[in-house]
Amino acid sequence: MEVHGYKTPQNDCSRRIREGLLLSEKICLMLILSACSTGYYIVHTSTWQRVYKKITIPHPVQEYSPSAVEEWYQSNYTTSRGSESTRPQEGNFANTKWIQEMEHSQRWRKNVTDQVCLKHRIFQQSVDAFLSFRGNRGTLFANDQHKVIFSKIHKVASNNFTKLWKTLGGLKHLYKESRDLCVGRIERYYKVIFVRHPLSRILSAYRDKFERHNYETFRKIAEGIKRRQRVKFPKAAKNTSSLAFEEFIHYLVNANKNRENSHWNLISSSARVCELRYHFIGKLESLDNDLQYLLHKLRSNASLTILRAYQGYNGEVETLRHYYGNISRPLLRRLYQAYKMDFDMFGYDMTILGSKIWPTH
């Protein structure tokens, strides 16, 4: 395989390329495509040149930073909700600037994801390897009408998305399907995932399961957390019967097994993002644009009012700062480290909390 690299900062790219040459050609190609956050690469292989002939990455980031990439994209190509001048009217998608912006967004997000997977040495699996463990299919649902695999993530508008997909022909849980029926879908279907800021998702899970509702399962979890935490941190509970948010955060950072619940686990691992490599990565914070673009890709005219509750969603900044403002900085740092894979992979950071809670210097 012949590789030419241009405008490569430092020697990191060439080093990673040399390391990649020791792997199989397919994995090596993935390494090269994800090796650097800046520069131009022309990759020629006998097998792959029709697929990846030229990849252009225009952002001059000298040191990899997922949040910097996303911030640069948002400031240079589009706002989180788009603008009336660039967003197309319903049904009028042909050759618009908005389409180009959305394609740029998807390229950036997938490039960031690839870099994080490379950093952690987690590579795309063959279909046989992926299906060898049934648990890999836990979040995956298939829509046969549009040939889509959708990764359903709790606390990322999952119930609203279920309603949407129902209007688009329904969903079949691949976990319940036979292995033979999954092979063709994994190989050929368009793979879609929507994600959410880790801090927002954690808070949403806490408020839904421990503040607003009294589900038996989560009531037992809360009682177990309180028994353990109030011995160590009696002031956190302030003598209340309900589970304090600080207690919940302590619970999340104290052990990996405490983060296994599907309502607050790491999306990057539970959805097998590196192993599966999704074609489309949407964000709840830019749902208006992302969902409309996805429906365009699927050539669907489904109504967006199904997800009306999340249209215009901006991450609930004030609510986040209200809850996390009472959490100590050392504990916040531990929480960040516990969910760092999701922060990095999807281009999020802690600055959403503001400098008073999370100083940037």
Image: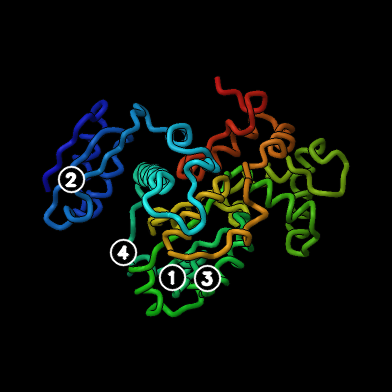
Q: Tell me if 288 is positioned left or right of 46 in this view.
A: right
Q: Amino acid at mark 1?
A: His
Q: Which residue is mark 3?
A: 168
Q: Nearer the viewer, mark 1 or mark 4?
A: 1
Q: Which residue is mark 1?
A: 146
Residue placed at 38% from the left, 67% from the top? Answer: 189
Quick check: marks 3 and 1 in contact, CB under 8 Å?
yes
Give residue 247's position: percent from left, percent from top.
Answer: 74, 43
Residue placed at 59% from the left, 36% from the top? Answer: 334
Q: Which residue is mark 4?
A: 126
Q: Quadrant of the C terminus?
A: top right
Q: Tell me if 97 is positioned left or right of 343 in this view.
A: left
Gap in angstroms between the C-alphas marked 1 and 4: 23 Å
Gap in angstroms between the C-alphas marked 2 and 1: 32 Å
Gap in angstroms between the C-alphas marked 4 and 3: 29 Å
Q: Earlier in the sequence, mark 1 or mark 4?
A: 4
Q: Which residue is mark 2?
A: 43
Q: Residues within 10 Å of mark 4 (few under 14, many from 20)?
A: few
Give residue 335's position: percent from left, percent from top.
Answer: 60, 39
Q: Nearer the viewer, mark 2 or mark 1?
A: 1
Q: Amino acid at mark 3?
A: Leu
Element marked by disc 2? strand
